[in-house]
Amino acid sequence: MGLLYLSILSFVLASNAQTGLLHVQNNTFNSTYQLTTTQIQNANLSQASAEDIEIALNFERSNWATGSVHDDAFYRPPLENCTSQPGSLLRVDEYTDTTSYTLPPNLALSRILFTSADLNGTAVPASAYVLWPWQARSFADSNLNVSGIPVVAWAHGTSGVFGECAPSHVRNLWYQFSAPYTLALQGYAVVAPDYAGLGVDRTDTGEPILHQYIANPAHANDLFYAVEAAQQAFPELSKQFVVMGHSQGGGAAWGAAQRQVDTPVQGYLGAVAGSPFTDIIENINVLPEVQSLFAWPLAQGMTSIFPGFTLSEWFEEEGIRLVELTQELSACNSAGSQILSQQQGIIKPGWQDNWYTQAFRNLTANGRRPTSGPLLVLHGKEDQVMYEKVAAKVFNETCEMYPESRMQFAAFEGVTHVPVLNAGQQIWLKWIEDRFMGKELESKCIWTEHKSIRPVKSYQKELSYYLQLALEGYTVA
């Protein structure tokens, strides 16, 4: 192995020697946005806070693979798309240039535009990517007669709420090895909607499309309609598919299982919901320190659901100014969280009891409703974003109400929010494989707990790296 590595390194360095001098790998951001004096004053920011926001914002923008979505013609929907039915295919970028993405070797990328439907049932254009494996996973022995490239519909966690926050134009597709890369490397075609309002943020007539954050039924629509459109674009995709998501996407996956009860889709095999949104109000009541992380993105799309909603329903005056700054900057997860990082004087006390909050909860909550097909829930017991005990309570209450549900809750000792996908990787990969093999699950709820083979404290707890685009041949380590 050492000789092979040295051979590769020697080849790379020799190639560089023929083409020119080596350069130091860039270690700065390729975005240099600076807040204006007016922006700083209007948001009442300290100089230190302004500098922190600029760093987070420029990090986000440096990770755009295709530049701004507003400069990328792919994200502009074709004229008269509003007349198309949900699930319609609007545009195909069959061979997306991956040179600005940080994909693993031997994966390929496509992008599509399609028609989805929001929480109100209104048809809206949306974008998605398809991540292709080098070779398709074979299910020749399946009793489901699976043919073609097996499909997993991937629902991402919170990336932001504006057009610029679409994973399809982020270098690492937002979740990289936590799920989409892993799935594709295992032979699955990953069909991943950005969600309505992300990527495509205006209609063909220029009307804004607001992202309805954590509106689980709407995100479930995005998943099913993205798969339908992708199957039209690429007939080699399997008719059968599994849904998988995490956090916001975990809520989408659970929402897909609920949607399947009343709007069954042929080929659906089940869903994996990692750290899912279930009852947002209960979660905030248990973990009040995360309320600003939920309130500001949630507020952005509320007027598309409730036209009478205003920011003053939830936010104090200072909070309104900060939320307006996120809108002006199109701040995504990193920058938006930095802008709303302070806890005091931002959100009105008792906002979770507001009529709009309660109405939204009633329309979108997961759990305490029937599901169709198998559902696997993954949750870390030390999750400080989505509290495990809230999800467990909702799971148990759902099982009491619908005891024949084919639901499994897998809890992981000492594991936090996103890392549950790493800790549970063997479990969810085997679970997905079993669905394509046609293995039946009993009509009952199952609870499992999983512990590490070494002391929990000896393990790496959180993600401690990010993927950087390699610009020089010697950066092979």
Image (cartoon, grey):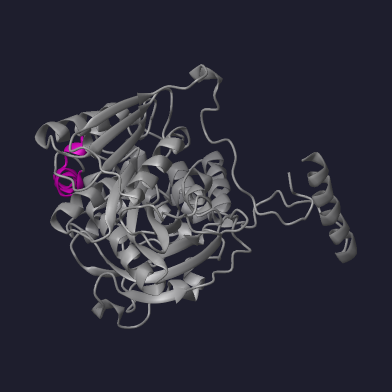
Residue drawn at x 42%, y 42% is 429
The image quadrant of residue 90 is: bottom left
Q: Quadrant of the N terminus?
A: top right
Q: Nearer the viewer, residue 217 or 106?
A: 106
Q: Is residue 180 above or below residue 113?
A: above
Residue furthest top in the image: 455
Q: Is residue 411 above or below residue 34?
A: above
Residue drawn at x 86%, y 65% is 19
Residue furthest left in the image: 401
Tell me how many marks there are.
0
Q: Is residue 388 above or below residue 67?
A: above
Look at the image and say whether residue 360 sits in the magenta stretch: yes
The answer to whether residue 387 shows anywhere in this view is no
- Position of residue 302 in the picture relative to residue 141 (left or right): left
Q: Nearer the viewer, residue 212 or 21?
A: 21
Residue drawn at x 23%, y 37% is 407
Q: Horizontal and vertical percent for residue 413?
A: 40, 23
Look at the image and say whether residue 156 sits in the magenta stretch: no
Q: Horizontal and vertical percent for residue 472?
A: 76, 55
Residue drawn at x 82%, y 55% is 12
- Position of residue 86 in the picture relative to residue 187 (left or right): left
The image quadrant of residue 388 is: top left
Q: Quadrant of the C terminus?
A: top right
Query: Which range of residues does the magenta coloring cover?
Result: 350-365
The answer to whether residue 20 shows anywhere in this view is yes
Q: Horizontal and vertical percent for residue 119?
A: 21, 59
- Position of residue 452 in the picture relative to residue 238 (left or right): right
Q: Horizontal and vertical percent for residue 200?
A: 39, 67
Q: Kindly report the secondary structure that dominates the magenta region of the rendered protein.
A: helix
